[in-house]
Image (cartoon, grey):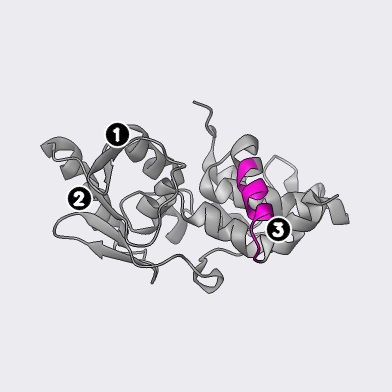
Amino acid sequence: MARLIGPKCRLCRREGIKLMLKGERCFGGKCAIQKRGANYPPGMQGWKRQKKTSEYGLQLRERQRLKRMFGILDRQFACALAEASRRTGNTGTELIQIVSRRLDNVVRASGFGYGPASARQIVAHGLTRLNGRRVDRPSMAVKAGDVITFTTREKPRAFIAKVLEASKAYQSVPGWLERDETNLSIKVLNLPAREEFPFEIREQLIVEGASK
């Protein structure tokens, strides 16, 4: 299974915004964006390599930001964009909703994962149950009314409870999800609206770049 590897903080510095890839670290003094600043790309002489960005460059950066926020690669992103294009609503808004409804993102947004990689690992290892059925596909889309629970095995549940306890200090649950801390479960109340998307992204640039 393909996945993003390497230092995560370099990705934030390259995109110039916090991508929230490292959980608690992103909110503390060790955050690379806070230490170096948003205008300091990675590399020994990153500050010297800044130059005026072209229109294509802006579109590419927005595309890369969205992919890295959710830990997805080109093929997964292309499938999501194609699905958004087939829908009748605004393509950019539909794209945001599609990636937000990924099972690994729901686990992460509810506080059961430190970041996208942690949430993806929990799902891929078969520790999640969707409406009572074991699932191990991070890209599975949830719908309104779905209930996500976790394995009954003691050791994995203890780890998931530990992650939740740590994430409560810096992460709130979006309004379209309901978290049960006692039973370690998540309920999807409704589909996410664009206003509930927690990250800085200009989705129209992504759509414009893809249409060329």
Is 119 in front, or is 16?
119
Q: State left or right for residue 152 relative to residue 45.
A: left
Q: Which residue is mark 3?
A: 39
Q: Which residue is mark 1?
A: 126
Q: Earlier in the sequence, mark 1 or mark 2?
A: 1
For mark 1, does the 10 Å Cα neighbourhood hold few (<14), some (14 to 19), or many (20 or more) residues?
some
Q: Earlier in the sequence, mark 1 or mark 3?
A: 3
Is 83 in front, or is 151?
83
Q: State left or right for residue 58 relative to residue 168.
A: right
Q: Is residue 203 magenta?
A: no
Is 165 in front, or is 35?
165
Residue drawn where x is 45% and y is 65% of the image:
191
Q: Which residue is mark 2?
A: 161
For mark 2, does the 10 Å Cα neighbourhood hold few (<14), some (14 to 19), or many (20 or more) residues?
some
Is 126 in front, or is 17?
126
Q: Earlier in the sequence, mark 2 or mark 3?
A: 3
The three-letter code of the residue at mark 2 reads: Ala
Nearer to us: label 1 or label 2 = 1
The three-letter code of the residue at mark 1 reads: Gly
